[in-house]
Structure formats: structure tokens, C-alpha cells
């Protein structure tokens, strides 16, 4: 038994959705821990000092260097002319 080759539908363009996803803030989880501690122990709770100090050091740390933009869609647009035009010739 021979199998028929799989035929893919024609594509109008090649594109990656949302290539530049933003990284979540690393201090966000510590901030939620501080708010949870304050909610359970009160604002002046003595057990929250270590979590508060961790939040202060996280906020005072220098920000991470910004990443360059992703160029995947640019390169896909360049190659799409070659790929799509070959499929239309057949």
C-alpha cells in the first residue's frame, strides 16, 4: 500500500504571532507575597520584615538589559517569495 503525500493548504504569508513576548517583572511575585503577608498579619506585622526587605532589594536592583527586537518575521517575509512562488509553479 502506498500512501498519498500530504498536501498543505496554500499560505498567503509566513508569520510568527507575537515574537516579542515581554518577560514578567521578577519583583511581581515578591510584591504579591508582601501583600499576602500584610493581609494576614496586618500592615505592621513583624513577620513580614524579611519579605519586605526582599522586595526592597529586588526593586533597588538595576533593571535587566533590554533585549533586541526579534527579526523572525523580517526573515520569513524575505524567504516567503521563494517558498510560495515555487509552490505556484507546479
Image (cartoon, grey):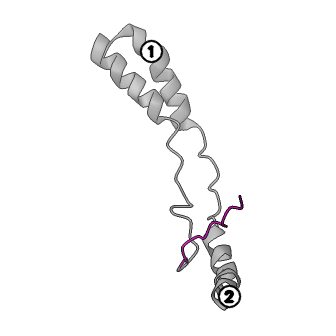
Q: Residues within 10 Å of mark 1 (few under 14, many from 20)?
A: few
The secondary structure that dominates the magenta segment is loop
Q: Residue under label 1, please give it.
A: 49
Place of residue 64 in the rendered image (x, y in percent of width and height, measured from the top left): 62, 47
Residue 71 in view (yes/no): no
Q: Between marks 1 and 2, how big is the CA–CA gap?
A: 71 Å
For residue 42, which quarter of the picture?
top left
Tell me, yes or no, whether the highlighted magenta stretch contains residue 82.
no
Name the one closer to the observer, 13 or 44. Answer: 13
Identity of the residue drawn at 63% across and 66% down: 6
In this picture, which residue range is highlighted in magenta? 1-11
The image quadrant of residue 57 is top right
Residue with the mark numbered 2: 90
Q: In the image, residue 43 lies at what x, y percent?
A: 29, 18
Identify the residue at image location x=32%, y=18%: 38
- Residue 86: mark in rendering: none
Left/right placement of residue 27 relative to residue 84 reads left
Amino acid at each position: 500500500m502506498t500512501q498519498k503525500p500530504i498536501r498543505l493548504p496554500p499560505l498567503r504569508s509566513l508569520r510568527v504571532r507575537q515574537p516579542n513576548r515581554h518577560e514578567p517583572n521578577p519583583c511581581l511575585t515578591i510584591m504579591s507575597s508582601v501583600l499576602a503577608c500584610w493581609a494576614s498579619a496586618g500592615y505592621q506585622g513583624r513577620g513580614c520584615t524579611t519579605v519586605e526587605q526582599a522586595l526592597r532589594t529586588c526593586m533597588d536592583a538595576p533593571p535587566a538589559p533590554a533585549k533586541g527586537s526579534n527579526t523572525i518575521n523580517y526573515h520569513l517575509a524575505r524567504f516567503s517569495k521563494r517558498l510560495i512562488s515555487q509552490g505556484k509553479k507546479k
